[in-house]
Amino acid sequence: MILAEGSSSPGLFATWRLESMSHIVEEIPAPFSASEFLDFLVGHYYLGSVGLDEAASVLGRKVDEATLEPVNLEITRGPRSSR
């Protein structure tokens, strides 16, 4: 990717590109913490995996260590209930 002169990241390139189209770009603090964002991503991924047991049953398979990678297996167990 060719970045605008002086920019070192795609985020800066996006800012430069928007400003070049007369948009006003302002940096703001994130409305959530990194931990909250991670919980959201895990929860969102979990919702997509809710039907996994049913799909595995139709295929005659089990959802376990033999059929899923460890990280995916952990995600299918659901979002963390507490910190």
Image: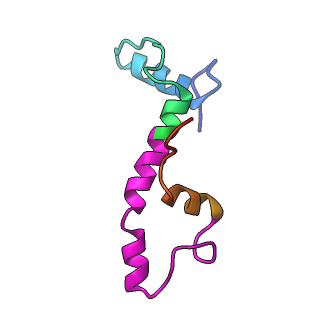
- Above or below, 71 against 26 in this view is below
Quadrant assignment, res 74: bottom right
The front one of 71 and 8 is 71
Q: Position of residue 25 (x, y in %)?
A: 41, 14
Residue drawn 38% across the image and 62% down it: 50
Q: In this view, does 40 lie to the left or right of 12?
A: left
Q: How is the image coloured?
A: rainbow
Q: Is residue 75 left or right of residue 50?
A: right
**What is the span of residues highlighted in magenta in the rendered image?**
40-69
Q: Position of residue 68 (x, y in %)?
A: 58, 70
Q: Where is residue 1 in the image (x, y as percent from the top left)?
A: 59, 39
Q: In this view, does 36 lie to the left or right of 47?
A: right
- Above or below, 21 against 24 in this view is below
Looking at this rendering, what residue extends furthest in the front direction? Answer: 82
Residue drawn 57% across the image and 73% down it: 64
Number of numbered tags placed on the structure image: 0
Residue drawn 55% across the image and 31% down it: 35
Residue drawn 63% across the image and 77% down it: 66
- Residue 30 magenta: no
Q: Position of residue 82 (x, y in %)?
A: 52, 38
The quarter of the picture where the C terminus appears is top right
Q: Is residue 47 left or right of residue 15?
A: left
